[in-house]
Image (cartoon, rainbow, N blue to C red):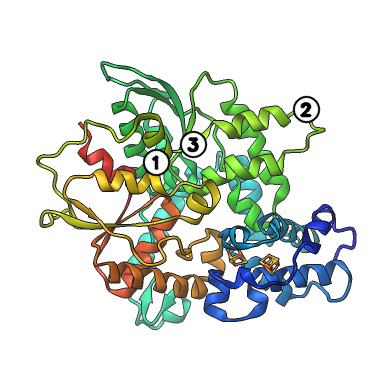
Amino acid sequence: MNKDYTFLAPLRDEVLKCIKCGLCMAGCPTYGITKDETMVARGRLTLIKAVMEGGIDASDKYERYITSCIGCLTCDINCPSNVKIGDIIFAAKAQLAATNGLNIIEWTASRLVVGLRWPLPLILRFFRLPMKIYDWLPVKSPFDSLIPFVRNNVKRRLPDIGKRPFSSQYPEIIKTTSKRPKGRVAFFPGCVIELSTQDIGRATVSILNKLGYDVVIPEGQYCCGSPLQSLGDAATAKKVARKNIDVFSPLDIEAIIVSCATCGHTLKKEYPVLLGDRANGDYNKVRGFSEKIIDIHEFIVSHHGIPNQVRNDNYQVRNNNNQVQANRQRVTFHDPCHLKKGMGVYQHPRDILKSLPQAEFVEMEDADACCGFGGIFSLYYYELAAKIGERKAENIKRSGSRIVATGCPGCKIHIEDSLHRAGYDATVRHTVELLDEVLN
Ligand code: SF4
Ligand code: SF4
């Protein structure tokens, strides 16, 4: 391994803060499934320290232990020594990428598609057909060993891909028609809403308009950079962060709204770490940008309280097949890691859900346990991601809910897959989709 440890060296003291207490084992999803000490923060930090001191080589096994960390922040929250575990793991991933290089697919995805941004719509069109073919392929066929993401003869449930990017379907400023206009906010959809779960974006814009806000979706937004950090491509992550800050900073807006918890956490909490060198003249600009980031649940509840236009009549809960369900449905909420542990938002979505007519809110067990998605993680470690998802599906089943609300499009996609595997018929929606249906 590269012996200069450019990325890890500044965090050496942070690594040494670990007192080996093992409290990070509680709730670590990768340890919970594998029961392997190297798959938890304590073990991962021990390996990183050993590699930095030259005690062991950065082998393929080491790479697996580091890259299989989901980045769920559970250990960050539980650690009594306040070790910045997330920062250390990102640095270790960056160190691995700097030493070993990205493979051709990672390099293309990172540097060309995400780093340049303009190929994204083309990629979107390109992937629609293979994804349809994947859906259509029978699991039991002569080619079944070639089909990825198959477990127990069940294929992964893939999300729909939009025909056009979400933001291209709107003018740059979507004006409110409210008789009591309140102001102007910007919306950062992020890649998943931009390309796939577009109903979440539509509901977000619709709610903000109904509440009296003009919504700006500025052109030139890039990926938030979270997948780039997971891949270890720190240079491109910094590049897209600067681009996003440059796009949003000149706008005369009250807040920058996010409906994707991972984007929100990255823009709000990771950018100041990534670009936060105080000696750097951009520090105040980065801070100013990050302080404007606010999750949609928090914005609705803390800026307005529960909207009093919630309609109490004619509300019908529909299932995945658009069939009307019996009145009063049980609804539960899955806390995305980056929403609760990353941004401290957990009460606001519950306040919204409890206000919905015809909805009976129930807590599921371990609502804040990771669902197993983790973006790149669930591509590289699908078996592990699916096992973590099984536990989430089991808890949803036990809650008796047929509607699962959540605050992150990535969680929605993975929970849908987990429920599909579990054979449990429940609808997964972002909270804003449920709220928008009942707002006048
Ligand atoms: S909880 Fe923190 S201090 Fe304790 S073993 Fe884990 S990383 Fe180390
Ligand atoms: S971030 Fe999550 S997966 Fe990674 S070590 Fe911490 S608890 Fe485990």
Distance in Å between CA atoms under marks 3 and 2: 24 Å
Closer to the eye: label 2 or 1: 1
Q: At label 1, which amino acid type do we have?
A: His
- Asked if residue 2 is positioned above or below residue 25 in the image, the reply reads above
Q: At label 3, which amino acid type do we have?
A: Ile
Query: In terms of secondary structure, where does tag 3 sit?
Result: strand
N-terminal-most mark, 2 or 1: 2
Locate ligand 2 by image quadrant. bottom right
Q: Read off the residue under disc 3.
A: 294
Closer to the eye: label 3 or 2: 3
Q: At label 2, which amino acid type do we have?
A: Gly
Q: Read off the residue under disc 1.
A: 297
Q: In the displayed structure, does residue 25 sit left or right of residue 18?
A: left
N-terminal-most mark, 3 or 2: 2
Question: Which residue sits at x=38%, y=61%?
Answer: 158
Query: In terms of secondary structure, where does tag 1 sit?
Result: helix
Q: Read off the residue under disc 2.
A: 281
Give percent across and percent down for residue 229: 65, 52
